[in-house]
Image: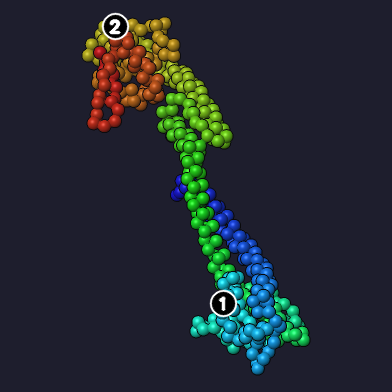
Amino acid sequence: MRSLKQQILILLLGSLVLLAACFIVVLGWYMKDKAEAAAFIKAQTDLATCEEIIDKSSPGTWAVQNGELYKGPVKINLNNQLVDHLSSLTGDTVTIFLGDTRVATTVRGSNDERAIGTKVSASVAQTVLQDGQTFIGKANVIGQWYETGYMPLRAENGSIIGMFYVGISHAYDQKTITGSLITLAVLGLALTFLVSLIAWFFLQKFVINPLHDITLGTRDVATGHLTEKIKVSGAKEIEELEDAFNQMVEKIQSLTDELNRTTDTFENNFVSKSNPPEIPLETDDEFYDPSSTANSPPASDSLSEEELPKGLNQTTLEHIVQFIQTTHRPLSAEEVAEKVKLTRVTVRRYLEYLEQQGVVKSEQKYGRVGRPVKLFIPL
């Protein structure tokens, strides 16, 4: 069974991990949407930038000559230098289309060669070539998804003869987002570890240690060894528990004292009623036998009731003395208590009084293990 500290730490760590996981998922979703929106804005901006660069580097109109695309006097078909230059400036993939066919591109196919001669997707062709609109959005480019921008290329008479494209790889976006989330997760784990150490310290100092002290005090009460109240410091609830425990200790001590006083009174009254003093019927010498213990005068005859300490009873005292003299051997308080049907605490008070009066003497008997036993020997 796990300790309270382990349960609290597991609960805390579980909560932190769950919170971090939810935060990362939400942040990842948010970053994904924001990254896509930023990519679309970048594609739109790059289209305008590249268009201006092409107009300045190759002045003139777009035209088709002998089945090839021209910008002014500059031939565009297989003009890798132009598209590579634009790609290096923007960081995008760049393609120039004649109609729906790529004639110059930085996009590469599965064989790692430029995808010259491949076609644009039908949805993009419809939007740009047929409707004459700029397309900004996700598009499948040679089997991969890109955030793209397509704009129509118009001849001098206004007819659409091709398209210009820039694209940002969706895999690149995912890689960037994943890298950011991994970094965030590492920082989150480090923060969780730090919070766990701090939580462990405060739990140990303000919860576990005070509860441990209270537990030890409870065990002392159970074994009857509690001698003073406990004092702990901690949270408000811990201090309330300490107050309740100390109040319980005071109550137990009060009840114990009251019970001892009641027990002594009851036992003394009980012994007085059940063991009345024997009155000898015959006192003639012919009935006296010096060797008979039963006819011997009790050793407590010299102890008058007026001389007894408070709480001791004359009849009970004589009963104990008679038993000791009858036994003629060293006895412990437990043995005497068992025979005369009194508590050990009560019998020990009578025996200590008899020892003060010189009726018995005591000595300690040491065994191999445990506490020594105090024996009372009749004199």
Task: Name the residue at 54% across, 68% down.
Answer: 175
Depth check: give the residue in front, 296 or 144: 144
Give the structural element (helix, strand or loop) at label 2. Answer: loop
Most extreme residue toward the right is 157
Tell me the distance, in whole angstroms, between the alpha carbons under discs 2 and 1: 145 Å
Q: Is residue 359 visible?
A: yes
Mark 2 or 1 closer to N-term?
1
How crowded pointer 1 is (Cα within 10 Å; few <14, some 14-19, many 20+) is rated as some
The answer to whether residue 216 is above or below residue 76 is above
Coordinates of residue 270 in the picture (x, y in percent): 45, 20
Q: Name the residue under label 2.
A: 284
Marking on residue 188: none
Depth check: give the residue in front, 171 or 164: 164
Residue 248 left/right relative to 69? left
Coordinates of residue 5 in the picture (x, y in percent): 48, 45
Task: Name the residue at 54% across, 81% down.
Answer: 108
Q: Name the residue type under label 1.
A: Asp
Coordinates of residue 374 in the picture (x, y in percent): 29, 22
Answer with the quarter of the image where residue 63 lies.
bottom right
Coordinates of residue 161 in the picture (x, y in percent): 70, 86
